[in-house]
Image (tube, rainbow, N blue to C red):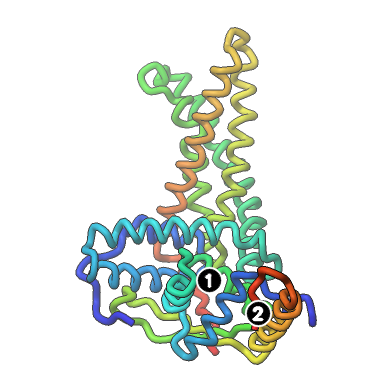
Amino acid sequence: MSRGDYLGEFEHLVLLALKRLGENAYGVTVRRDIETRTQREVSIGAIYATLDRLETKGLVKSRVGEPTAARGGRAKRYFRITVRGVAAINKTHEALRKMSDGLVGVRSFA
Amino acid sequence: MTTGASRSRPPRVAAWLVELFASTQEADGILGDLAEEFTAHERVEGTRDARRAYWRHARHTMWDLAWSPLGSPGTSGARVTATGLVVAAGIGFLAHSMATGIVWPVGHVLVMHGIYKVFPAFQWWEDHMAAPFAVGTAIALISRAFGVRAMGALFVNVALSVGLAAWLQRMSFRNVPSLGPVALFASLLFRLLQNISLNVIGAIIGRLMPFPDRLLRRQPATQ
């Protein structure tokens, strides 16, 4: 596993959100997905900063979408997870499972 | 997601400030997302609440964008910020030198003709009213033209101007031995706030000017 494939906690959450949202993954939907599921307040800036980092690592790709009136005429920037991104999630899950296996009082990571 | 235009616009000042912290490539996506959140919030909670929420989101977004390059070297955000810092240091130095070169003779003329008795010329000119303002504007214009994060660049410039102000202050007080450390500290604090606010006001005005985008507009990369 190369250094770039290691995921930080927030990177992990963002990648999982991208995977879940599929074609409809952009700043607003990613932020809402993470907030709804983790009850953690997240800013758009944090999402973009993380996506920028993930894109640099090659785990995410972006494209510019259509502008809408609700967005003040500004275009959406859609993100999608790459094959490397999915592999990074799986490797992180595997590492977490191995680390948590057999620990008393810690829920096993399946 | 939500469709249709909002009844009112998001707070413009908050949007300008966010734009200062984002690169040209990021700005459209971020401001569009914030506007979309504003529209959705306004429908449910009303304009007043939506504006308050927008400011909160904008504040958190600025904070996260400002610090993100430190935690992620090598990313495009870090690269544009680093470029901005180098550009700002150069422009800041040049602009400060030029501004000082202009304001000293102006101050001299004001003093020679006794105008300072009516209007405190030294306080307004030599004490860096013009320089931080001009530098803030210049940095905002250049950063927009090159698509770098203006606020990262501005941080360096603020540091430069504060250092310069501190040095000038020290020179000013060299011949006033009766002045205690508290007065010196208060004066330095005043200079610091003055420099920062003028830099930021200059930068906001620089963001409002339309021509740099036309000169060197860079479109976000499409897939």
Asked if marks 2 and 1 touch (Cβ < 8 Å), the reply is: no
Q: Is residue A35 above or below residue A76?
A: above
Secondary structure under the numbered disc 2 in the rendered image: loop
Residue ID at (65%, 62%)? B83
For disc 2, the marked residue is A109
Q: Nearer the viewer, residue B87 or A15?
A: A15
Position in image of residue A33 (x %, y %): 45, 77
How far is disc 2 from disc 1 in space, using C-alphas?
28 Å
Q: Residue at x 61, y 59 (%)?
A: B84
Q: Is residue B92 above or below residue B18?
A: above
Dot 2 amino acid type: Phe
Q: How would you rate the neighbour count of disc 2 (Cα within 10 Å): few for under 14, some for 14-19, many for 20 or more?
A: few
Q: Position of residue B137 (x, y in %)?
A: 48, 52
For residue B101, above or below residue A22: above
Q: Residue at x 43, y 66 (%)?
A: B211
Chain assignment, label 1: A
Q: Is residue B139 left or right of residue B74?
A: left
Type of amino acid under label 1: Tyr
Q: State the mark number for residue A48.
A: 1
